[in-house]
């Protein structure tokens, strides 16, 4: 059974399987990018409340403090269980929520945990260090992803695997140049520690057909997010910030739009995508020249006639080409607005 600090996720193609839930690669990272600042503040508050109390209990060998320390730890668990993949996988909840009382009840393990230098104490110290830096490490990763997406991916004209590869390479080379400034004594790399195993799993779609999957075991949420985000880029999935509501959404398989499909702020039914398309059309109309405006009206009129089968496709193509030619002449000053309007009306 999985634990908070040791859990397995299955990866197959452009998807991952967490418990009984299938996600497109990159979707979990996208959800966490939208976490509110208050959530991180609360997590830091809970870990700050737990870690010193746990260290004090171990140093003083105070068995009576176990219940209080456990309550503080459970507040951390409650927050983490709100997040994927923790909310989806089969965690050993019973052990996690009774960790210290169970430890105290086993005299041999309690003795080892309270004795510096022993294997048990080293493991608990590692666990406390990990918990103490949990909020900060998660924020560092998500802020790095946010900055990378904003500076290197947002300017892309295309949303394809090749485009993502170009943006990642640009970011990687820039980061490599700056690495000696921040880590002069270490080799810089984008990496995380995982244990990997290849296993058969039944697909969670309607076919339930068996597929080969990679079973990756992670020892932290951040190490999992590395795999989710970068594997997503490899498969053409990338988070993008919505140009309307400002929240991140996942672009999959090279689909290119700058608006999410969630209900737009201040709306009851219209999505950001619909609001964005409407606003874009209004802006384009507002910036139209008189010639462009007359051409658009003629184009829409011809389109209606074509859809109603009043003109053939060949007639449609010829008339649109003629309208474009007259529009260009008007923009060059060779036709007045009134002359253009008269010619377009005769199409």
Image: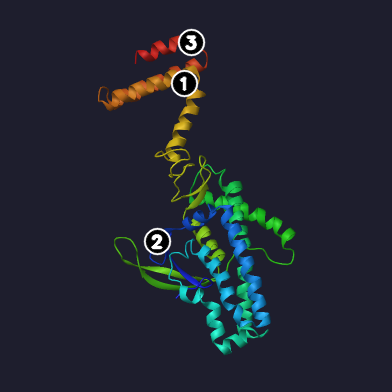
Mark 2, other Cα within 10 Å: few <14 / some 14–19 / many ≥20:
some
Is there any visible trace of residue 202 in the rendered image? yes
Give the residue pinned by disc 2: 22
Measured Cα–Cα span from mark 1 to mark 3: 13 Å
Answer left or right for 51 relative to 92. right
Q: Residue at x 50, y 52 (%)?
A: 238
Single out the mark in the foreground, 1 or 2. 2
- Measured as percent of width and height from the top left, residue 345 is found at 36, 13
- How many circles with numbers are drawn on the protein? 3
Q: Earlier in the sequence, mark 1 or mark 2?
A: 2
Q: Which mark is residue 347?
A: none
Q: Which residue matches tag 3?
A: 336
Q: Residue at x 44, y 46 (%)?
A: 255
> According to the image, label 1 marks what residue?
292
> Closer to the camera, 203 or 313?
203
Q: Residue furthest bottom?
A: 108
Q: What SS does tag 3 mark? A: loop
């Amino acid at each position: 059974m999985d634990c908070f600090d040791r859990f397995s996720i299955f990866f197959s193609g452009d998807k991952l399987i967490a418990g009984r839930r299938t996600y497109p690669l990159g979707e979990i990272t996208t959800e966490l990018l939208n976490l509110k600042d208050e959530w991180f503040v609360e997590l830091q508050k809970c870990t700050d409340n737990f870690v010193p109390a746990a260290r004090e209990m171990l140093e003083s060998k105070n068995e009576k403090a176990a219940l209080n320390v456990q309550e503080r730890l459970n507040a951390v668990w409650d927050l983490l269980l709100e997040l994927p993949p923790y909310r989806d996988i089969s965690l050993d909840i019973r052990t996690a929520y009774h960790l210290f009382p169970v430890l105290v009840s086993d005299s041999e393990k309690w003795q080892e945990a309270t004795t510096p230098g022993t294997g048990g104490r080293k493991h608990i110290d590692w666990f406390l260090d990990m918990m103490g830096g949990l909020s900060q490490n998660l924020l560092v990763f998500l802020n790095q992803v946010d900055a990378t997406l904003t500076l290197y991916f947002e300017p892309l004209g295309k949303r394809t695997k090749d485009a993502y590869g170009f943006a990642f390479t640009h970011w990687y080379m820039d980061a490599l140049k700056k690495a000696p400034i921040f880590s002069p004594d270490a080799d810089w790399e984008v990496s995380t520690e995982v244990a990997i195993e290849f296993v058969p799993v039944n697909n969670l779609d309607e076919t339930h057909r068996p597929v080969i999957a990679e079973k990756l075991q992670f020892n932290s949420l951040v190490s999992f997010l590395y795999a989710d985000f970068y594997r997503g880029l490899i498969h053409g999935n990338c988070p993008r910030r919505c140009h309307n509501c400002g929240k991140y959404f996942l672009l999959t398989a090279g689909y290119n739009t700058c608006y999410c499909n969630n209900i737009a702020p201040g709306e009851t039914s219209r999505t950001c995508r619909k609001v964005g398309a409407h606003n874009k059309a209004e802006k384009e109309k507002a910036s139209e020249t008189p010639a462009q405006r007359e051409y658009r009206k003629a184009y829409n009129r011809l389109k209606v006639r074509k859809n109603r089968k009043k003109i053939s496709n060949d007639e449609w193509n010829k008339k649109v080409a003629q309208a474009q030619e007259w529009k260009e002449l008007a923009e060059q000053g060779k036709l007045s607005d009134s002359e253009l309007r008269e010619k377009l009306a005769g199409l």
